[in-house]
C-alpha cells in the first residue's frame, strides 16, 4: 500500500464509509436490536485496499483476534 493510500485510509471516518456503502448498494435495513447490541459488540472496522480494482473492502474483525 502506498503512503497516499495509507494516509487516505487513516483519514476515513464512519460517515464516509456509510455514505459510500449506501451509494454503492442503495437502501439497507438494519434491525433495531443490531444497534442495541453494537454497544456490547467487540468488533472493529477493517479497511483493506485492492490496487487492482482500485477499491476498498470494509469488514469487521473481533478485537480479541
Image (cartoon, rainbow, N blue to C red):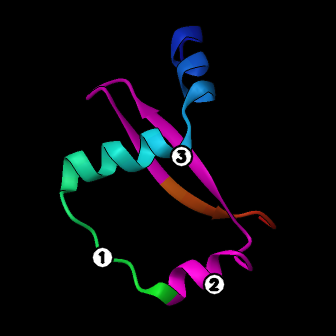
- Tell me residue 38's x, y (percent): 63, 76
| Image quadrant in which the N terminus is located | top right
Q: Are marks 2 and 3 in contact (CB under 8 Å)?
A: no
Instruction: Tell me the CA gap for discs 1 and 3.
Output: 17 Å
Residue beneath label 3, please? Answer: 14
Does the magenta segment cover residue 6?
Answer: no
Residue 57: x percent and y percent? 41, 45
The image quadrant that residue 63 belongs to is: bottom right
In screen coordinates, is 51 left or right of 49? left
Badge 1 marks a residue whose secondary structure is loop
Q: CA distance from mark 2 to mark 3?
A: 18 Å
Looking at the picture, how far across and down is residue 44, in whole percent? 67, 58
**Would you place residue 51 above or below residue 29 in this image?**
above
Q: Residue furthest bottom?
A: 33
Q: Secondary structure at mark 2?
A: helix
Q: Residue at x 52, y 82 (%)?
A: 34
Q: Rate crowding at label 1 as few (under 14), some (14 to 19) or many (20 or more) other CA atoms within 10 Å.
A: few
Q: Earlier in the sequence, mark 1 or mark 2?
A: 1
Q: Which residues are magenta?
A: 33-58
Q: Residue at x 70, y 76 (%)?
A: 41
- Could you tell me which quadrant the C terminus lies in? bottom right
Picture coordinates of residue 60 (x, y %)? 57, 61
- Disc 2 target residue: 37
SS at mark 3 in the image: helix
Q: Which residue is mark 1?
A: 29
Q: Is residue 54 magenta?
A: yes
Q: CA distance from mark 1 to mark 2?
A: 16 Å
Amino acid at each position: 500500500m502506498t503512503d497516499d493510500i495509507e494516509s487516505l485510509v487513516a483519514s476515513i471516518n464512519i460517515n464516509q464509509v456509510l455514505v459510500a456503502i449506501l451509494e454503492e448498494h442503495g437502501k439497507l435495513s438494519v434491525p433495531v436490536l443490531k444497534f442495541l447490541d453494537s454497544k456490547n459488540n467487540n468488533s472493529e472496522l477493517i479497511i483493506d485496499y485492492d490496487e487492482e480494482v482500485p477499491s476498498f473492502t470494509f469488514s469487521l474483525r473481533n478485537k480479541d483476534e
